Amino acid sequence: MKFLRWSAFFAALAACSESNNAVVGGRTDATVDTADAMPDVSPDVALDVAPDVSPDVTVDVPVDTGPARCFSNSECAGNPMGSVCDAARGRCVQCLAAADTCDPAQHCDDASNTCVAGCRSDEGCAGSDAGVARRCDTATHACVECVRDEHCAAGSLCVGSVCVPGCNDTRACPTGQSCCGGACIDPQRNTAHCGACNRACMTANASRACTNGTCTVATCTAPFGDCDGSATNGCEVNTLTDASHCGGCGMACAPRANATASCAAGRCDYACSTGFADCDGDPSNGCEVDTRASASHCGACGRACSLPNATAACVMGACAVSACAAGFGDCDGNASNGCETDTRVSTTHCGGCGMACAGGDNALPGCVTGRCVIACVAGFADCDGSAANGCEVDTRTSAGNCGGCGRSCSFMGAGASCAGGACVLGACDAGLANCDGAMANGCETDTRTSAANCGMCGRACPTPAHAAPTCAGSTCGYTCLAGWGDCDGSATNGCETDLAVTAAHCGRCGNACGSGVCAGSVCQAPTCTDGVRNGTESDVDCGGGACPVCGLCRTCRVNADCAAGTCGEGNLCSYRTEVSIDWLTTCHGPDNTPTDVTVTGVPAGSYTVTALASGGTVWSTTILPGQGWFWNITCENLAVPELATTSGVYYADAAAAFAALPRTTSTVSFAGGTLRCYFSDSACRDNRGGVRFRMDRRCP
């Protein structure tokens, strides 16, 4: 019986195996159709097909083991190409996708009709991950944790083939928990659902807590403190600015002699009298240093007089030169740079200020250890040490004195010359090159193996992302680094994917995390610190559920999502306050002691200011004013000129003045901090009425 030698067939199969190694410009993998590789071959003809195949891999296949074409599986019995008949194409194959007979851990590839890796049923996933029930995703032929919700435990849903915490109408929570907004929560402790779903706890300037289904205060929000011990007003004291509670409740700033105490950023601060400072930080001795005469604290604490090359003194808070160090002089008379001149080397002040050195023929003057010498012109040197013949050697071209006296040019295995005062390397041996440009080590690079200089200097082998370049026989290649994968299938960007942290390819290419977070090659459940908007969050790591409330201009759904308590325009967290300025109460005048209107903790930014109708009686009935009423906002750190009636035009009452406003809204900027508002008049007690307006912070 004659045989065909199918070496090329097995070589093609070997080429299909995956490898982390790739050669730039190398052959691409090819698929060999084994059925088409042996059509109707005569038994008397021996066909040798073995391109690029190792001579050690040869398989003899009987030509006459099956029919040239098949019509049923029985005709393929014992056929080496497979025992299943592909009737449409009339050939024997391993399997058909419509009648998959592969092992449960494999499936039939419809293109090649061969069994390939990847499950076709749950049996193919048995034992694939110890301790976790595995299911087969028949769409992707991958073993996963779950395919449907029923595969997960109570209180969990199947998301992205992974069981994650959650619930719905058909998936109940464990005993003692309630399903709120798709999440299982404990209504006895959850602050967003305390006692019942959507019953959120709110406490001024404090973090929320839920105890036995009842809202309580947990901890104060920095920098506020509950200094009066009353839970009704929350954490009422700002410990960053209150001198009686500076940095904490009951921490009052102690008085200091000759200093004024204040509280800033939660720390006591003191202002010393002019000309004095508290340099030792000891409150018991107050401001102990006279900065006008102290050389250690001249003009300010820690400003020590340390002038270059000089002994310093302090005169009226400024440093001055007391004496110069040996070998230096204050030749410019400027105390700020000390004794700036080195009289040991200065040609204009050699040995002392004003003592200049003279030059010589074909030479420049120099100064060495305070004595004048002659310096050669650039490119020449006095190599024989004789001043009589000057600088006799041209160091730009002399091979025995190249660039300096006694500097001889010599290179191993190459000629040498001197040009421009530098030694020049001759031709390198074959296969070697001087790629670093350094003459001291000669031709140091083997261009046959150097990945940085493969084949020639400067020809660096490409290094795709997270891959190591290689060079063999002057041909470049590369190898992917551990933990990285080429998930986009493009060789141009190399191994572009970090499998340890990439949510779309967590641990392996194509393994996407439903939470959007991958750490240590393992998909993570949503958290409030993962930097991804997931779970019930209204913005990244804030709002909704148990995550902290969001800051200004972060995305929100309801007011409870926001730290400032307002979910404003465009579903962004905002800040809102209404200000009411009573004329008589806040009036600054000789007949009234005012009470200013203040609003603390106003964030900086752009605000929409809206005028609100005031109402009330404008004037008293006992003393009629000489003029009527006008409407304007009077605040010392908030100017809104657009929300005012025309200067010099007055109205009979507040309602008329409000109606005369040209507009009732305006956009202004506020620097942040405390808003302070009041009116001023020469006679306050004949006035009544007031002004009200609302401030809404705008987001960019």
Image: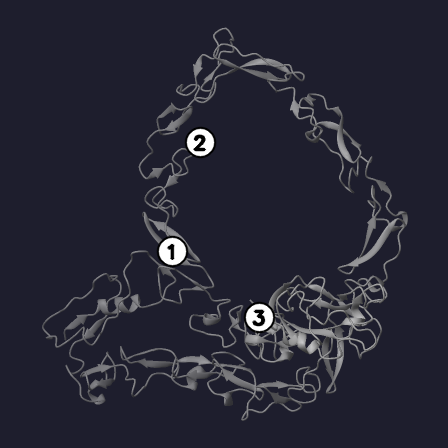
Residue at label 3? 530
Q: Amino acid at mark 3?
A: Asp
Disc 3 crowd, CA 10 A, few/some/many (<14, 14-19, 20+)? some
Q: Is residue 341 above or below residue 639?
A: above
Between label 3 and label 1, give the one nearer the viewer. Answer: 3
Q: Nearer the viewer, residue 637 or 163?
A: 637
The earlier-in-sequence mark between 3 and 1 is 1
Answer whether labels 3 and 1 touch (C-beta < 8 Å).
Answer: no
Q: Is residue 579 visible?
A: no
How far apart, in angstroms, are the residues tagged by discs 2 and 3? 54 Å
Relative to 285, is 2 on the left or the right? left
Residue plotted at (35% across, 26% down)? 415
Amino acid bearing label 1: Tyr
The residue shown at (37%, 25%) is 416
Horizontal side of 133 relative to 274 (left or right) equals: left
Q: Residue at x 67, y 18 (%)?
A: 353
The answer to whether residue 320 is above or below residue 632 is above
Helix, strand or loop status at disc 1: strand
* Mark 1 neighbour density, 10 Å: few (under 14) some (14–19) many (20 or more): many
Q: Nearer the viewer, residue 205 or 476?
A: 205
User: Which structural element holds mark 2?
Assistant: loop
Q: Which residue is mark 2?
A: 440
Residue 301 image offset from top left, x and y in percent: 78, 42
Quadrant of the rendered image containing residue 18? bottom left
Q: Residue at x 76, y 69 (%)?
A: 626
Q: Quadrant of residue 538?
A: bottom right
How many marks the image carries: the answer is: 3
- What numbered label is drawn on residue 478? 1
Residue 664 position (above or below residue 360): below
